[in-house]
Image (cartoon, rainbow, N blue to C red):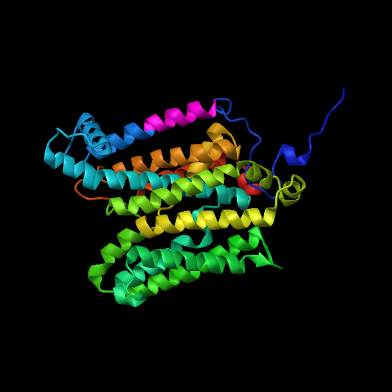
Amino acid sequence: MTTTTRPAAREAPRAGSRIRADRPAPLHAVPLPLCLGLLGVVLVVLVLAAAAIGSVSVSIGDSWQVVWGHLTGQAVTVNPAHDQIIWNFRLPRVLLAALCGAGLAVAGVVLQAMVNNPLADPFILGVSAGGSVGAVAVMALGAGALGGLGVSGAAFLGAMLAVVLVFVLGQQRGRLNPVRLVLAGVAVSYVFTSITSFLQLQTEPNNMRQIMFWLLGSVSGAHWEQLRVAGVVVVAATLLLTCHGRQLNALVTGDESATALGVDVRRLRLVLIVLTSLVAGVLVAIAGGIGFVGLMVPHLVRLAFGADHRRLLPLAALVGAVYLVAVDLLSRTVDPPNELPLNILTAVFGAPFFIWLLRRDRSLSHS
């Protein structure tokens, strides 16, 4: 009996990799346009439902009339109060939740491929910790603490400062080293987290609720101006990263294999870091640190649809959007009239998922 051996680069990722791509995904053969279309329909229906549900209930039909009327310029025939509630308050927060879910999921997919570790997420670069320092500095010390910057501006500045530090520390002999990048991200995150804790001790007790709510993630203060920036960044970055899908497929097989396939690994990693940092930095500045989305959604999509990044990235964006819209809806309906920070619910769902994943794939704990 003759046996054949496939090249290691095609059989599985390189040694030490924890991303498994050898198990068949149940939906890997479903055409991508069909998957995107179905997920798009689910997202639209969920957005309309989330815009309709709240302390003042509105029918999904009225929600659709409000959205369609504003988009097309037609007269809105529903109750003017409902029109105001849906268009000016609920819809911006629902769309921001969708953008945050999509952006964080895409960034998580890319970073897991870049460092070849399924435990990587957008905040591995210190983005969340850096953004927290900037935002908390403004909330604790006042707008004059950072030259008049607002919370969002200061958070973005802090997030980008953390990324720069991680990028500098993560290089070895002029080349970006994935292991050093992860370690630098952990170190910078610890330093920035300690600074955030110190700033919290200096603030007035009345500010603590606002600070804690921001640190735990929230889209409650969303408005249309924020959506323009977040929308352009998330959509543009997702399209650009999807165009690099074939190169990401090569990257997860190892640097040597990717180089042999004609990929400029150094340049690719630089592009990936810039795009994912920009996405995560903008979203952290607007919505605070929302955890587990970029960690959990890539696994769900990879298990269901396969590990081909040309499919994985756009599908992860839609699944992430659906997931966080649903989480935001739960956050404001599970304990009315109180609203829960998003991180509480994402942790409730995310932690059991990873326990299941560890039991399902023991290679995560042994490789």
- Residue 261 picture location, percent across and down: 74, 44
Number of numbered discs: 0
In the picture, measured across the screen, residue 349 lies left or right of residue 18, that is left
- Residue 202 picture location, percent across and down: 32, 77
Which residue is situated farthest in the right direction here?
1
**Residue 175 vertical position relative to residue 311 in the rendered view, above or below:** below
> Can residue 122 be seen from the camera position used here?
yes
Asked if residue 33 is among those painted magenta in the image, a careful observer would answer: yes
- Secondary structure mostly seen in magenta is helix
In the picture, measured across the screen, residue 313 lies left or right of residue 45, that is right
| Residue name at image x 37 percent, y 65 percent | 153
Dividing the image into 4 quarters, which one contains the N terminus?
A: top right
**Residue 214 vertical position relative to residue 83 in the rendered view, above or below:** below
- Residue 262 picture location, percent across and down: 74, 47
| Residue name at image x 60 percent, y 69 percent | 168
User: Where on the picture, by quarter, is residue 242?
Assistant: top right
| Residue name at image x 44 percent, y 44 percent | 102
User: Where on the picture, by quarter, is residue 172?
Assistant: bottom right
Asked if residue 179 is among those painted magenta in the image, a careful observer would answer: no
> Can residue 347 be seen from the camera position used here?
no
Q: In the image shown, does 46 or 150 lie closer to the viewer?
A: 150
Q: In the image shown, does 17 or 44 lie closer to the viewer?
A: 44
In the picture, measured across the screen, residue 323 lies left or right of residue 108, that is left
User: Where on the picture, by quarter, is residue 269?
Assistant: bottom right
Boundaries of the magenta span = 31-42
Q: In the image shown, does 85 or 126 lie closer to the viewer?
A: 85
- Residue 323 picture location, percent across and down: 40, 40
Which residue is situated farthest in the front direction here?
73
**Residue 142 vertical position relative to residue 348 in the rendered view, above or below:** below
